[in-house]
Image (cartoon, rainbow, N blue to C red):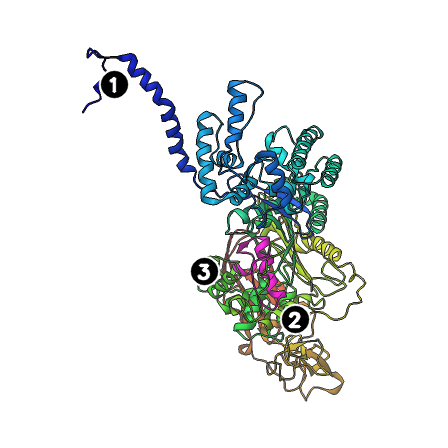
């Protein structure tokens, strides 16, 4: 059987017009069938990435953050659909929504007659389901898409039900100003959740999708247009019997009173915080949608931003261009203020977020290194460290750190070494712990990478070799204020993962005892002497632990301080990493931190609060000698006190002070044969030999080691003298600091003579150079070249071994 009769007439001839007629007759069916096939791809309710509105902790607007795809809105509807909103939207868009299965045949027939037969004013027939299909599909509306949407509307209604369809429509329909969905629009225009909308507000809101661009309720004209359509919707609700006359009258009166919506304005002081939140929301598995309550307190945020801007203005003459600051709740870890620069639009390179930019940490890692020393080496507050010229290098490699003040404090207690931020003792602790061990511990604090590169930094890790950012440093310092517990910073107010329980060992970065003692060391104003004076930028009328840091060349100035309630961190420096005019953490960052901290504690400024930071449970206080770390008694000249764990307190009484007979004619030791009129008893300090040169340089009374030759029976042979250059060691290399003024760089050469002599003759490259008196330190002007140093006792053949160094 063939279909040739369709193509030929009764005489067998080909009939072309008949083919055309048949083809044209089939086109409508093909058109509809194609739309039907395409509609099969629309049988789903699409999910969208929502945007967020960020509020501060007091529910004040901070910013709106787009979804990763650039959307605004698409918030999910509440579990129970609001009655007022559903009533209004059905009255506005689809009166018989509850009666049809996606396509309203009556409306479609009316629209066809009006639009194509009578050709009156345009009449629409799109149902809520059809509009939902079109919104999900996107693109322009045309006859083909209308048929496709009709099929899709039926599928959606049949497969998902009417409630889910209207829920989807209300979640994705356009409400102007790039806003999609009624929940987001309700918050933006009425500042309330969608379930709290009145009928009048609902009618106004569902009016907007008819013409989102023209019905902009942020403008008077747009509000009037939307209000006119809302009146029509309320009238329909009355006509359909969905509301009574009283509710209609109340709604109309309320509609007339609705004012132009107020735009939420983003505060310039919060821009870097906003960008931080955007990164957090876009780059994490954050499952909260819509309205987000942040940890930020905009009152504190604005205050800190203003103070930082003013402070930078004062430091402008000292070549400080920018800064950053954070304020954190010490207990919960909530970020209360996050300032990335001196002003996003007003400061130089202000668009850069310096709070998250790694910079040289200076001395900021010392508290953690000292805490590691207490945990691993058993160090206590009575441990004595050396603060003298010392070469920590090995073999041919030298490492000779210097303190920021280019001075020395001799034998120094553990807590004083930290509180005074001494570099040399910190390097000593680092060397005894091991660089790689410290690096691994810093990785647990997220201050170092997990790459095993501790040797890359070497001992310089303790004095600024490692880079980190202000937010990470502040997070690590929270462990010192929270008994060693560490957790991530909390950025959202309803985040339950603030500070974990104390028994969570995985998050115990430090032992509670070491953290509490380091906190006490850094809060002790007497322990900071003499480096940081009383009444200065570290002095507070309540308990505050403070630590500053200054990077090499004064490129970075840091300060971190915390009280019982808050932690404040500040960084100052320049975008190009160039030096400031000697701005340190103490005189640059600390004043700003103090001002912020005092502002945060208005009720504690009177200084009447009792007590400081507590000592660990069960620890007891003991008096100790500051020069030896041994137990102090009534005869000990330099005394302090601190707490010790049971069994770790010093047992031996300090013998730093001794009384010896001297010959008043020359100040040397007198024997029993010395005539009584020339013999006198004097008090002296008894220190280890390595500290005697330092003690003499400080004017401290050091016991003489040589007997007076004027006393009968006293004798001293030349071979009894011991003379040695103790610093630097032979083979050391030194570099002249390019930032020091010309002629101001000196290399100290230290020599110890036992027994001591009044004068010492120095030779440089074999030639006589100069004489020194005790303490025997030659201050040699630094110039490039190779040098050989030797010390000799005048008039004798006694000489030290030669020490050879190179200066670049």
Using the image as rendered, state which of residue 51 and residue 85 is in the foreground: 85
Counting residues from the start of the chain, the first of labels 1 and 2 encountered is 1
Q: Quadrant of residue 155?
A: top left
Vertical placement of residue 664 versus 80, above or below = below
Looking at the image, how many numbered discs can be counted on the residues?
Answer: 3
Using the image as rendered, state which of residue 16 and residue 641 is in the foreground: 16
Q: Can I make out residue 551 in this image?
A: no
Q: Which mark is residue 6?
A: 1
Whether label 1 touches label 2, CB < 8 Å: no
Asked if the stretch drawn in magenta spans residue 470, the answer is yes
> Where is residue 248 shown, x and y percent of the image?
71, 38
Q: CA distance from mark 1 to mark 2?
A: 122 Å
Using the image as rendered, state which of residue 289 and residue 476 is in the foreground: 289
SS for tag 1? Answer: helix
Q: CA distance from mark 3 to mark 1?
A: 91 Å
Labels 1, 2: front one: 1
Apparent side of residue 665 relative to residue 398 in the rendered image (left or right)? right
Counting residues from the start of the chain, the first of labels 3 and 1 encountered is 1
Taking the view exactly as shown, the residue that stands out farthest to the bottom is: 672
Apparent side of residue 673 relative to residue 289 in the rendered image (left or right)? right
Counting residues from the start of the chain, the first of labels 3 and 2 encountered is 3
Is the residue marked by circle 2 packed among few (<14), some (14-19), or many (20+) residues within 10 Å? some
> Which residue lies under the disc numbered 2?
695
Q: CA distance from mark 3 to mark 2?
A: 35 Å
Residue range (magenta): 461-490
> Where is residue 83 shown, x and y percent of the image?
63, 45
Q: Can I make out residue 344 in this image?
A: yes
> Where is residue 469 shown, x and y percent of the image?
57, 52
Vertical placement of residue 81 versus 378, above or below = above
> Which residue lies under the disc numbered 3?
455
Asked if the stretch drawn in magenta spans residue 172, the answer is no
Apparent side of residue 730 relative to residue 780 in the rendered image (left or right)? left
């Amino acid at each position: 059987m063939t279909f040739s009769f369709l193509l030929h007439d009764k005489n067998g001839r080909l009939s072309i017009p008949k083919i055309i007629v048949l083809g044209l007759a089939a086109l409508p069916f093909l058109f509809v069938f194609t739309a039907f096939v395409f509609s099969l791809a629309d049988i789903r309710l699409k999910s969208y990435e929502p945007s967020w509105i960020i509020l501060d902790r007091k529910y004040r607007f901070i910013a709106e953050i787009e979804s990763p795809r650039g959307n605004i809105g698409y918030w999910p509807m509440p579990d129970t659909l609001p009655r007022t909103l559903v009533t209004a939207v059905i009255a506005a868009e689809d009166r018989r929504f509850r009666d049809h299965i996606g396509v309203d045949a009556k409306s479609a027939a009316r629209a066809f007659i009006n639009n194509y037969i009578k050709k009156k004013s345009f009449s629409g027939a799109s149902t809520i389901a059809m509009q939902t299909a079109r919104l999900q599909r996107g693109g322009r509306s045309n006859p083909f898409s209308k048929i496709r949407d009709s099929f899709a509307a039926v599928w959606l209604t049949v497969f998902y039900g009417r409630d889910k369809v209207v829920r989807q429509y209300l979640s994705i329909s356009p409400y102007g100003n790039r806003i999609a969905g009624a929940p987001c629009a309700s918050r933006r225009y009425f500042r309330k959740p969608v379930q709290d909308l009145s009928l009048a507000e609902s009618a106004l809101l569902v009016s907007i999708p008819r013409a989102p661009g023209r019905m902009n309720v942020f403008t008077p004209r747009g509000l009037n247009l939307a209000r006119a359509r809302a009146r029509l919707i309320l009238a329909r609700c009355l006509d359909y019997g969905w509301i009574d006359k009283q509710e209609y009258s109340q709604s109309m009166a309320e509609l007339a009173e609705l004012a132009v919506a107020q735009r939420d304005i983003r505060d310039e002081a919060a821009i870097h915080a906003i960008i931080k939140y955007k990164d957090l929301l876009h780059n994490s598995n954050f499952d909260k949608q819509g309205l987000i309550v942040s940890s930020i307190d905009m009152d504190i945020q604005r205050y800190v931003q203003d103070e930082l801007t003013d402070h930078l203005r004062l430091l402008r003459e000292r070549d400080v261009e920018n800064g950053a600051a954070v304020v954190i709740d010490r207990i919960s870890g909530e970020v209360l203020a996050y300032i990335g620069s001196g002003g996003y639009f007003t400061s130089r390179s202000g668009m850069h977020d310096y709070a998250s930019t790694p910079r040289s940490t200076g001395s900021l890692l010392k508290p953690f290194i000292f805490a590691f020393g207490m945990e691993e080496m058993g160090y206590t507050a009575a441990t004595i460290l050396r603060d003298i010229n010392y070469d920590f290098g090995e073999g041919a490699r030298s490492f000779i750190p210097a303190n920021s003040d280019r001075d020395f404090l001799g034998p120094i207690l553990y807590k004083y070494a930290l509180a005074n931020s001494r570099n040399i003792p910190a390097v000593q602790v680092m060397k005894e712990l091991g660089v790689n061990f410290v690096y691994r511990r810093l990785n647990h604090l997220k201050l170092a990478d997990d790459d095993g590169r501790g040797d890359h930094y070497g001992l310089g890790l303790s004095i600024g070799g490692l880079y980190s950012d202000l937010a990470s440093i502040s997070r690590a310092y929270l462990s010192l204020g929270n008994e060693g517990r560490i957790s991530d910073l909390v950025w959202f107010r309803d985040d339950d993962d603030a500070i974990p329980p104390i028994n969570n060992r995985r998050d115990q970065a430090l032992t509670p005892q070491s953290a509490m003692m380091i906190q006490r060391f850094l809060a002790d104003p007497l322990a900071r002497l003499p480096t940081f004076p009383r009444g200065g930028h570290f002095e507070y009328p309540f308990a505050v632990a403070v630590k500053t840091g200054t990077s090499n060349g004064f490129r970075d100035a840091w300060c971190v301080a915390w009280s019982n309630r808050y932690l404040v961190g500040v960084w100052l420096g320049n975008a190009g990493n160039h030096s400031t005019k000697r701005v340190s953490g103490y005189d640059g960052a600390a004043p700003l931190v103090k001002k912020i901290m005092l502002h945060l504690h208005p009720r504690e400024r009177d200084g009447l609060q009792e007590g400081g930071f507590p000592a660990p449970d069960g620890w007891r206080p003991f008096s100790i000698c500051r020069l030896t770390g041994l137990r102090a008694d009534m005869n000990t000249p330099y005394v302090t006190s601190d707490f010790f764990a049971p069994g770790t307190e010093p047992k031996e009484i300090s013998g730093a002070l001794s009384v010896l007979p001297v010959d008043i004619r020359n100040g040397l030791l007198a024997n029993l044969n010395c005539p009584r009129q020339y013999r006198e008893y004097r008090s002296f300090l008894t220190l280890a030999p390595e500290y005697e040169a330092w003690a003499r340089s400080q004017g401290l009374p050091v016991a003489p080691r040589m007997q007076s030759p004027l006393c009968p029976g006293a004798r001293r042979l030349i071979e009894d003298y011991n003379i040695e250059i103790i610093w630097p060691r032979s083979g050391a290399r030194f570099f002249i600091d390019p930032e020091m003024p010309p002629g101001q760089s000196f290399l100290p050469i230290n020599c110890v003579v036992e027994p001591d002599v009044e004068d010492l003759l120095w030779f440089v490259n074999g030639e006589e150079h100069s004489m020194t008196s005790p303490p025997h330190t030659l201050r040699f002007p630094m110039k490039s070249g190779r040098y050989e140093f030797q010390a000799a006792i005048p008039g004798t053949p006694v000489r030290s071994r030669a020490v050879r160094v190179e200066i670049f």
